Image (cartoon, grey):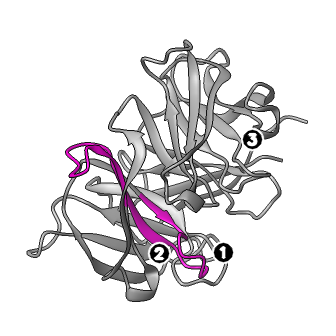
């Protein structure tokens, strides 16, 4: 069976096109649904604070704007912004992985919790990672800090480095060269849900593909990121007018391929396009 061929959603949303931050999916109110979230990090209101905005759920087709909040974070762009349930209450907290100009001279993790409507920090810490920007910084669904190193790797391969949440990000639990050759023709993502202790690694290839279409490639965590579990062309034409993600929107076992289109939108709105694995 061909994978990632079936388009299950293609819709304009309630949001006007804007690229002053990060577009992603997260459960804002703890109802189990993945809302469309905009972390606005530039050109915010007079207080110059990072803002969080959300439109309701895949099931609602992102037509209802239901959340807008100025946060405790000052506007800055020295790292990576994420929505992640760090506290474990079912609601997505706002996470800032600071990788440049840090006070500790190490990569830092800062978290404002959903329970305070992003007004209070529940974590501000330096980590065991040296400051570097040769790849993608993210978190697994278990809250571990993950660095997917894509440039200047000692192994010549894509590398997967992990510092554990349980150690307050002071101890490494993985330093692995994967079977992916180092390349930057797309977006590197973790599976949105860990299949075991660690998350599978996905590569959404959007340039220079052999199939002439967007491709999805993945290595399994169970194999130590040495075994390819998927390598397929998809139904998406090559395009880079937005952000590509792997997300659990349709709630199938395997993640969906999602394109949040933020430029050149036919609808005149931010668009969400979803292709399920099967």
Mark 2 burial class by Cα count in 10 Å: few <14, some 14-19, many 20+: many
In this picture, is 47 found above or below 44? below
- Seen from the viewer's position, the closer of residues 38 and 130 is 130
Q: Of the numbered discs in the image, which one, if any, rests on residue 55? A: 2
Q: Secondary structure at mark 1?
A: loop
Crowd class of label 3 (few under 14; some 14 to 19; many from 20; radius 10 Å): many
| Residue ID for mark 3 | 4
Question: Does residue 83 show up magenta in the picture?
Answer: yes
Tell me if residue 250 is in the magenta stretch.
no
Gap between marks 2 and 3 measured at Cα: 25 Å
Q: Position of residue 223 (x, y in %)?
A: 81, 32
The image position of residue 7, as x and y in percent, is 70, 50
Q: Measure the alpha-carbon separation of dots 3 and 1.
A: 20 Å
Determine which quarter of the picture holds residue 65.
bottom left
Label number found at residue 134? none
- Which residues, given as a range, are shown in magenta? 82-109
Q: Position of residue 263 (x, y in %)?
A: 35, 46
The answer to which of marks 3 and 1 sits earlier in the sequence is 3
């Amino acid at each position: 069976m061909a994978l990632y061929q079936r388009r299950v959603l293609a819709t304009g949303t309630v949001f006007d096109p804007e690229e002053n931050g990060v577009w992603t999916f997260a459960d804002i109110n703890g109802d189990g649904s993945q809302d469309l979230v905009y972390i606005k990090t530039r050109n915010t209101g007079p207080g110059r604070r990072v803002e969080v905005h959300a439109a309701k759920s895949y099931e609602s087709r992102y037509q209802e704007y239901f959340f807008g909040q100025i946060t405790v974070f000052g506007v800055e762009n020295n790292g990576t912004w994420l929505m992640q349930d760090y506290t474990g209450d079912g609601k997505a907290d706002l996470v800032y992985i600071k990788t440049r100009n840090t006070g500790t001279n190490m990569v830092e993790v800062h978290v404002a919790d959903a329970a305070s409507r992003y007004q209070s920090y529940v974590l501000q810490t330096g980590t065991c990672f040296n400051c570097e920007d040769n790849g993608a910084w993210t978190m697994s669904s278990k809250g571990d800090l993950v660095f997917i190193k894509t440039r200047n790797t000692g192994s010549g391969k894509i590398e997967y480095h992990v510092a554990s949440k349980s150690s307050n990000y002071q101890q490494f639990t993985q330093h692995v060269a994967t079977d992916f050759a180092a390349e930057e023709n797309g977006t590197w993502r973790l599976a949105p849900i860990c299949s075991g202790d660690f998350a599978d690694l996905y590569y959404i290839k959007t340039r220079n593909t052999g199939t002439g279409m967007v491709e999805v490639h993945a290595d399994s965590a169970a194999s130590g990121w040495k075994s390819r579990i998927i390598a397929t062309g998809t139904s998406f034409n090559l395009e880079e007018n937005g952000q590509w993600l792997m997300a659990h929107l349709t709630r199938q076992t395997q993640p969906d391929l999602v394109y949040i289109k933020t430029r050149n939108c036919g609808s005149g709105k931010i668009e969400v396009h979803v292709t399920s694995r099967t």
